[in-house]
Image (tube, rainbow, N blue to C red):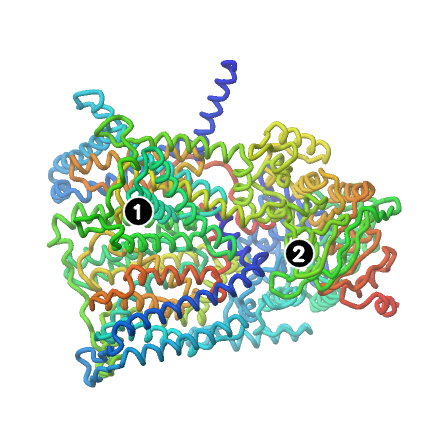
Amino acid sequence: MTTRTTAGRLGRWADALLRAFTDRSVVVTVLAVVLAMALGTVLMVLTDADAMASLAYVFGRPGDFFAAAGQTIGSAYAAMFTGAVVDPTAPDAAGFFRPLTETLAWATPLAIAGLGLSISFRAGLFNVGAQGQIIMAAVASSMVGFMLHLPPGIHLVLTLLAGVAAGAIWGGIVGLLKAKTGAHEVILTIMFNQIAYLVLAYLLTLPAFQRPGTNAPMSPALDASASLGPLFGAGTRTTAGIVVAIGMTVLVWWTFQRSTIGFQLAAVGSNPFAARTAGMRPAVVWTMGMALSGAVIGLAGSIHLAGDEHFLKLGIAGSIGSDAIMVALLGRSHPVGVLVGALFFGALRAGGVNMQAYTGLSIDIVLVIQALIVLFLCAPALITKIFGLRRSERRAITPLQKVELSR
Amino acid sequence: MTDGIDIVRDHARSALRASVSAAGRAKAWIAVSVLVVLVALLVALTTSQRPQAVTVFTLAGGTEAWQLPPMQVPTLAAGWVMTVLFAASAAWTCVRVLRHRPVGRLPLAAVIASGVVAFLVAAGAGQTIPVVGLLSGTLLLSVPLVFGGLSGLLAEKSGVINIAIEGQLLAGAFSAAVATSLTGNVFVGLAAAAAAGVLTGVILASFSIDYLVNQIVVGVVINVLISGVTTFVYNQVLVPDGAVWNTPERLPDLSIPVLSDIPVIGPVLFDQSLIVYAMYLAVAVIAVALTRTSWGLRVRAVGEHPLAADTMGINVTRVRWRNVLLSGLLAGFGGAFFTIGSVGAFTQDMTAGQGYIALAALIFGRWKPLGVLSAALLFAFANSIQQTLSTLGLTAVPQQLLLTIPYVVTVIAVCGFAGKVTPPAAVGDSYGKGI
Amino acid sequence: MRILLDEVTKTFGDVVANDHISLTINPGEIHCILGENGAGKSTLMNIIYGLHQPDAGRILVDDEPVVFESPRAAMERGIGMVHQHFMLIPVFTVAENVMLGDEPKTSARLLDYAAARRHVVAVSERFGFQLDPDALVSELPVGVQQRVEIVKALARDAQVLIFDEPTAVLTPQETDELIAILRQLSAEGKAIVFISHKLREVRAIADRISVIRHGRVVGEAPLGSTESELAAMMVGRSVSLTITKSPPRRDWRSSTVVSGLTVVGSDGAVAVDDISIAFRGGEITAIAGVEGNGQTEFVEALVGLRPVSSGSVTVDGAEVAGKAVKDILAAGVGFVPEDRKANGIIGSFTIEHNLVLDRLSGGPFTSGIAMHRAAIRENGEAAIAEFDIRAPGPTALAGTLSGGNQQKIVLARELARPLALFIASQPTRGLDVGSIEFVHARIVAERDAGAAVVIVSTELDEVYNLADRIVVMYRGEIVGVVPPETPRDVIGLMMAGIPAAEAVGSAR
């Protein structure tokens, strides 16, 4: 291979990355993040007791207010940075890079689940059922993980596969119901999320799932042979899951861009009627798409269980379900974009944990900022309007005109 | 993404209808038989263990003038009689439905009533079931579902999907608690709840109507956003200084003279707080307004065929904006129930999925105000039974499984196994050139 | 009320839809606007109706300049429009549809249904047709729905009525009835604007004919013009209205035999009722009929898009009824669906990808689940050249192309394999004359290559142009199979369900 083609290939990759993540132009993406952070900051200041106390006399001594507000904001973002990127105060290299490993750890399930969601999005299905698929996967994985006792290696693989299967079934049922009855997948997945949670709650009341010696709804821990260990040494949380996430990114990318499976998903997702006329079977593709989506999301749930939580509990899925939806939206369902989005959200989360520990600010501010970013990125026109940028010159066309023009 | 939504509709209408009806036929029978068998099993189980047991239903509520004495029924006999009635009426209904004959409301009520009574008789063997408590609990639990369902109804009738009901309820609950705590006035709390709902409506409307963002995406994100904001403020402000921020008065019960003295019905329906009476009013007004006023006609037109409405000079964007704001107002107002309407203080994510049950009530109620009310009452009743049984220490049926009823019923409904469920035709479609 | 258009100009991006158009619309006159698909007729009418605002030029109503910001403004000045795709709300009753936007109210500010009903009855009776104000629109036949549209406009006291291709969905008889209504309306002093590309109709009803080409008025045609004179004016060159083709070969070796085919439609009713017919290679069979009489369901069932209730279909001896679409296509069936945008192409896909939609297994384009990008590209470039698809290249999105070019993509895809049976539904609907000629030529070429060809068309001109024999369908049944020399009025009667022998009798 000559250097020229390598460079060309790299160039194309960079191009794909840019297009996936910043379809709306780099400027808009940056501005959306800035705006979301700014609003989050306003909320921080408004709820900061010192700042609000000094706001009472802001006109008398404005310095106090700005000092108090600045103190809050400054320490919060500093803590976020040192929690998510690198910690310059650490005594050694391991400590210095530890925050990055936290970011990777948080990003792992988000990336995999986000990739799973992008599969269903590609088939035109708005799967909001990641939460339920993760729960069912975690249930299945935990059963293999603590009820069976198998040799290392096999045990881990079976634990993960159980989750993949459970996620595929829980998602596949939705696909099948939609394909056979035309029911709306958004409604179905919402209901399936709630059902999954109640099934989990019920299972945790059963003796078989109850951890001995406690009344709390929690299962016994997974066997060590069914767990994922830390990749970068003791005390860090990044597991081989991040390698799986990167591998899945490549696999999903190839599936979308180069395989007939991705072609069919996109064809049915864009125009199921034309796809059907051309001999594809939308019912099969929808079922398959939801099952594949659920399988990958299930993998995320299993890796989260085996690598992070190690036992089943009511909050096993955390907010991965809704975070993954936001990650998939952020990455515009492009695998590379999803991976980047997951790393970004992982960093916010890791930084948020650190911020909460050091400044006492509740980590939920991260949720607010994440939601705002996604909201703003969905409406680039709003961003360009707020910041007074020149609008694109594409002529707006009303629906009535559209109908007439399409003749 | 919008394509996917279009598909659902067109798909349901066209090619697969034939195969559905065949599959649906079998499934309807399976679903009904499973229910009947479950009830029969429960009766068999309890009566075989305690054949002599008696189930007591208390019918008195508290302050009503005329009180009925408790009713005692032998579990064995009553249980089997009701089970047979249930099986027979269910089978009859099933046959009617499958032959495409109309089923009246009375037979349907008979199916539900006989099934529920059979269940209660068996589950309450040797125990006392407080009927008034059960029913008034049902009414209370239905309040957020009815407001949420009506909220979804107003938005969807105009063609905008509101997935953000959950978040709007939460915003209402939060604002009501904080505003009431700060002012000491429950009416300020109610107003604040409604205002918070309207504010979320503004977000939904501006993004989905003006900026043409996928309505479901906006709804999902709004839910995350509100959960984040309320939890953050709760942890930062309400928890550290609860005495100031999170100790609201509660809405007082207003008993209506005479009416509240009727046995059973009186304490259940007419000895409630303002928010319950507001709910009666909301259902009635919306039911009339949607079918009998020009506002309602235009809203329905916009939700069915916005292009046609546009050519008749109706401003689609304005109609949708107004309805989304009204939708937010209702959900926010209903959210006040969680705090000042019941327990008082706000806690993190306290709506706990009720917004999704409200969505379920909307679908199961077939986009009709009275349907929403009935569905909400049905779902709330299931919840109330679960609460009553667990207070009595009865665990014949796992409470978590009882709680899945609304969701399972909704899945069955949207899959067309319980008759045709048709949303407004243009729901989910963006309209207009945007900003 | 007289409307004067003065140098009206409208552009969309780089396309000049209307280029300095000046027209006069007089009361008591049926003014036909004749032009090809894409000539700019609809844009012009939408400007009059307030859906578009002109970039330049003026509209004068009774010599007073007006600006219509919205349809509402146009309606208030007495302009009504009957759209080609009806603007009716299917789940509403006739009365609700008519009152929408201008509702009568009772003293309690509730809807006054009684007044609305009276209004519908009064308006419809005045013009001599009956409408049940309480009927659900979705349950009315298409012709009646069109009358609801007319009543909607008249109920608002419209003085100018614009009809956009109103006969596309009507039987010849219904068309005659519509023409009678139009005459009555114009006799009452209403101004009628009748937009069409159908020469025969225009000749039949016009009081004045304006011809539009490429966004400009090319002139008024004299009322006595022949069809070929009108066509030449419309297209800008002399057009041969009929194509020359050799006599059919009728080869029994390649044949499709349909026997006892019954198909259930989307509404659950029987759409195709026990049809038996054979299609021979080297022959074009045209299925004529009013839209909605089972033709769509018939061909969809042949291709496998619709489940077959009973009956059999054999292609070259192999049974295909009940098989999956993919298998039927593989058995040598090619299909051009009637709604190419909805069913033929995927707008968000590239041209080259649209060309391989049905060739994902076997073939040169894939091995296993991997796709061969180079082969797909080559195929795209070849098809673009062979079918004269006007596009920047094989990676252009299909949705950005004109209707004619989209249809060429579908044809290129379907004709890429050797076919035993080629089915084309409404193959030239909405296309310009150049594309129509191309499509017709390819269809005849496919016949000459030996395939059995089935055309479904609601345009009788097209049926006569292509058919080696004509099959007329009515309510899911074949009314008759007749030679292409059968007179037009006989076919018209057959389309209304009258058997061939009887139709011949009553046509005389």
Indicate the position of residue C353 as horizontal and vertical percent values. 60, 36
Element assignment for label 2 = strand
Q: Is residue C99 above or below residue A45?
A: below
Give the residue type that dot 2 points to.
Answer: Asp
Q: Which numbered dot is residue C164?
A: 2
Element assignment for label 1 = helix
Residue C194 in sight: no
Label 1 and label 2 in one chain:
no
Quarter of the figure that contains the C terminus of chain C: bottom right
Indicate the position of residue B172 as horizontal and vertical percent values. 26, 57
Q: Which of A44 and C37 is in front in this view?
A: A44
Write the residue at 63% across / 64% down. C159
Label 1 – label 2 distance at C-alpha = 48 Å
Q: Name the residue under label 1.
A: B225
Write the residue at 57% across / 54% down. C50
Q: In this view, does C165 lie above or below A243?
A: below
